[in-house]
Amino acid sequence: MSTAPWRQSRRRSISVLDLPCAERTVGVEAALKLPNVLMLVVEDTCAQIAHEDWQHREPTRWHPQAHRCWRSEGRPLRAKKARLKELAAQCLDAPD
């Protein structure tokens, strides 16, 4: 299975999926054939949607309490992204 670091995936073909949270790319064929890779794609997509939603709800600095609550809401999202990076390393870097 061929994977490339996320930063190097700028020139990707349509047969490659970006996993922004895991900072990787993965081939569509691998995602369809391997259940653990498909799970990684789904988890990464859900985490990315949650992170973008959280970012768009950032309150202004004029409301410090709301901003503190917003930042604390982001902690588990950042932890999820870190776990996805680890999971990607386990799934994609494992010898075939």
Image: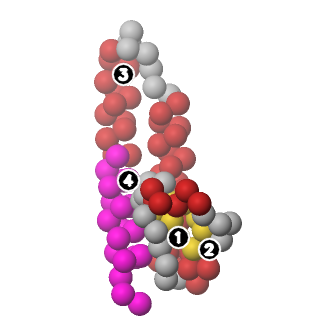
Q: What stretch is highlighted in magenta?
A: 78-96
Which residue has dot 3 on it? 67
User: Which is nearer the N-term, disc 1 or disc 3?
Assistant: 1
Which residue has dot 4 on it? 81
Which residue has dot 1 on it? 26
Between residue 78 and residue 6, name the one nearer to us.
6
Secondary structure that dominates the magenta span: helix
Residue 94 picture location, percent across and down: 35, 82
Distance from the alpha carbon under mark 1 to that under mark 3? 36 Å
Q: In this view, does 53 lie above or below 92?
A: above
Image marks 3 and 4: residues in contact by CB distance under 8 Å: no
Image marks 1 and 2: residues in contact by CB distance under 8 Å: yes
Distance from the alpha carbon under mark 3 to that under mark 4? 21 Å
Q: In this view, does 21 lie above or below 30?
A: above
Q: Which of marks 2 and 3 is in front?
A: 2
Between residue 27 and residue 62, name the one nearer to us.
27
Residue type at mark 2: give it. Answer: Val
Residue type at mark 1: give it. Answer: Val
